[in-house]
Image (spheres, helix red, strand yellow):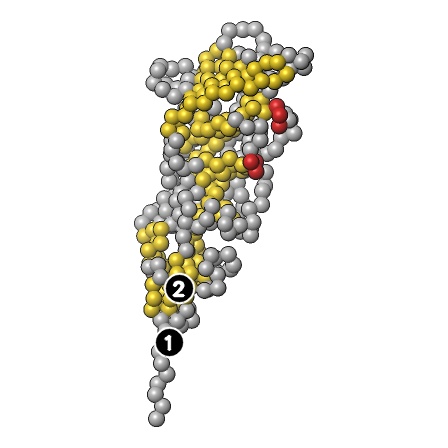
Amino acid sequence: MRKATLCVALIATLAVIFAGCGGDDSTDTSPALRGDWAYLHQQAPGDAPTIRLHLQNPSVPLDDQIFAWLFYRSAGQRYFSLNAESLVDAIFESTLPGGVWDDSPRARGLVALQRDFTYLTSAGDEETVSVDLEYDDPALQPGVRYYHRVQRVVEPMSRAGSGAPVTQGVGTAQVPIINVDPWNALSEGSQPTSGVTYMTPPVLQEPASGAVNQSTTAITFIWGATVGADDYVLQVFPSSDPTGQRNPRYQATLRQGYGGVMSYTIEDSFAAGTRFYWRVGARRAGEAQPVNEMLLQRGWLYSSMRSFVTAQAPPPPPTN
């Protein structure tokens, strides 16, 4: 059974601080922040991404009045309830490093957490907020669009009123529940994010890694489409840019909204006997663009980089 229980001695106002918004269609050299939004965050080309949430730094309440952050996720349903079924993480900190939270693609299974927090009332009395959570964190699935909502547990601002405790999400032993005591310990939920489709980087096929004797006039690049993406970019870089941090020497963009194998042939004059590097980026049109931490670039979820070497130029004809 999965359940999440928040037992609060006094009324706890859970502030609503998160709202989602998407990115634009530009490609920046650094991931500038535009308020609260969610996007795919990739540490380096070829790495599986997380879904990263940027959170506002509210002025009320103060940092020392915040006890915990609760993160909720829904697969395919933007407007969803904040209950034990959708709870996927809890951070018992007053602030989040960098103001961000990463939804990892790996499953953590059943998680049980318990923590007590003490604070002083306006009268100088010491009181306790008790948080007891049990929830499941399933793996992110490629091709599924996920929405997130956030709540905080904060220092109670007033005395709890009288009245019997209430139970939200009542069910059998197989159905998660949230018990709230007192009844008004939970606030309205935050607005959901705009939604991010989880995906993995494209897998390169041809030319093979380190391939030699490639044509100097036309090279066909082949890769596997990634579930959830519908925009792709093929980029080829010179030997002086093995990590692809500058503008590519050759680039082509393609659209394909289904799986399978993709290919594209670049017909141009490739220098003979020269090493080149290539990669493929993917994204979902209409969603916030992925960010690559190593490259300090926003726009694409990148495959790993591969290299190939073009054929040597033929010797000149003999002279008489």
- On screen, 225 above or below 119? below
- Residue 179 visible from this viewpoint: yes
Residue at x 51% of width, y 51% of height: 295
Q: CA distance from mark 2 to mark 1?
A: 19 Å
Any mark on residue 70, and which? none
Q: Is residue 109 left or right of residue 54?
A: left
Q: How crowded is the residue under tag 2: few (<14 C-alpha within 10 Å), some, or many (20+)? A: some
Numbered circles on residues, count: 2
Give the SS element for disc 1.
Answer: loop
Q: Amino acid at mark 2?
A: Ile
Extreme residue in the left direction = 260
Q: Residue furthest bottom?
A: 320
Q: Position of residue 223 (x, y in %)?
A: 35, 54
Residue 10 placement (x, y as % from top left): 57, 13
Res 257 seen here: no
Q: Residue at x 56, y 24 (%)?
A: 67
Q: Earlier in the sequence, mark 2 or mark 1?
A: 2
Residue at the image point whose x is 48% and y is 36% from the top:
102
Instruction: Give the image quarter of residue 141.
Output: top left
Q: Position of residue 152 (x, y in %)?
A: 55, 25
Helix, strand or loop at label 2? It is: strand
Check disc 2 and report the residue beneath it.
266
Given residues 147 and 176, the one toward you in this image is 176
* Disc 1 target residue: 313
Residue 73 sits above or below residue 252 on the image:
above
Q: Which residue is painted at 60% across and 20% down in the image?
A: 155
Q: Position of residue 31 (x, y in %)?
A: 55, 46
State the residue in front, 116 or 218: 116
Task: Inspect the image, locate mark 1, and give the three-letter code of the amino acid beneath it.
Answer: Ala
